[in-house]
Amino acid sequence: MNDRTHSVFDKEKGILMGRVGAGEDLLTGIKNELQKHGITAGSVTCIGSLSQLSFVQFEYENKTLSYSKPIEWDTPVELLSGNGVIGVREDGELDIHFHGVFMDHKKSISGGHFLEGGNIVAITVEFTVLATSAIQTKKEFNHSLGFSFFNFYEREDG
């Protein structure tokens, strides 16, 4: 039995399945598995448990859209649903735009945009990635909106 982070990639179907082990950061763990298999574009879903969280939430004040300051939780939660888009930033580094819905021990449900480095797995997180080699996903800054987001292109070498 393997209790550490690991994954298996079905290249024919473009499906990666795996888990992130206890004590590891959720997004860093998934990114490490993506890099092992050369995956740079696709989508990820997951479920599991986290011992601490780091995320931001959407804010709307004075007709202005923004994100909250980072919210840090040291309370264990059940990750009911996690979803993300996989791509690369303008500097070429792998990135995951990830949102999650979670429930704490008091049965309160919340969620947000997860930040890499502060979402530590409590017991396990199992994940599934649908990978593509025909699409290039690139996070680019949009000056008119003031946010970076993924754009999608046909991959010439795909």
Image (cartoon, rainbow, N blue to C red):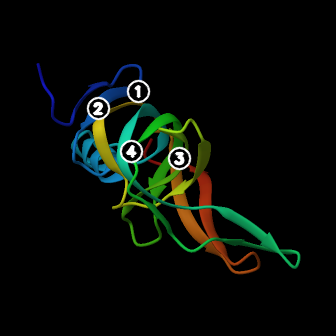
Judged by depth in the image, the label closer to the viewer, 4 or 3, is 4
Q: Label 4 is placed on what type of residue?
A: Pro
Judged by depth in the image, the label closer to the viewer, 1 or 2, is 2
Q: Earlier in the sequence, mark 3 or mark 1?
A: 1
Residue 36 visible in the snapshot: yes
Residue matched to label 1: 14
Residue 121 x, y percent position in the rendering: 30, 43
Mark linked to residue 19:
2
Q: Earlier in the sequence, mark 4 or mark 1?
A: 1
Q: Can you tell which quarter of the image residue 10 is in?
A: top left
Give the spatial CA distance, label 4 vs label 1. Answer: 32 Å
Label 2 environment density (alpha carbons within 10 Å; few <14, some 14–19, many ≥20): many
Give the spatial CA distance, label 1 vs label 2. Answer: 17 Å
Judged by depth in the image, the label closer to the viewer, 4 or 1, is 4
Q: Earlier in the sequence, mark 2 or mark 4?
A: 2
Give the spatial CA distance, label 4 vs label 3. Answer: 25 Å
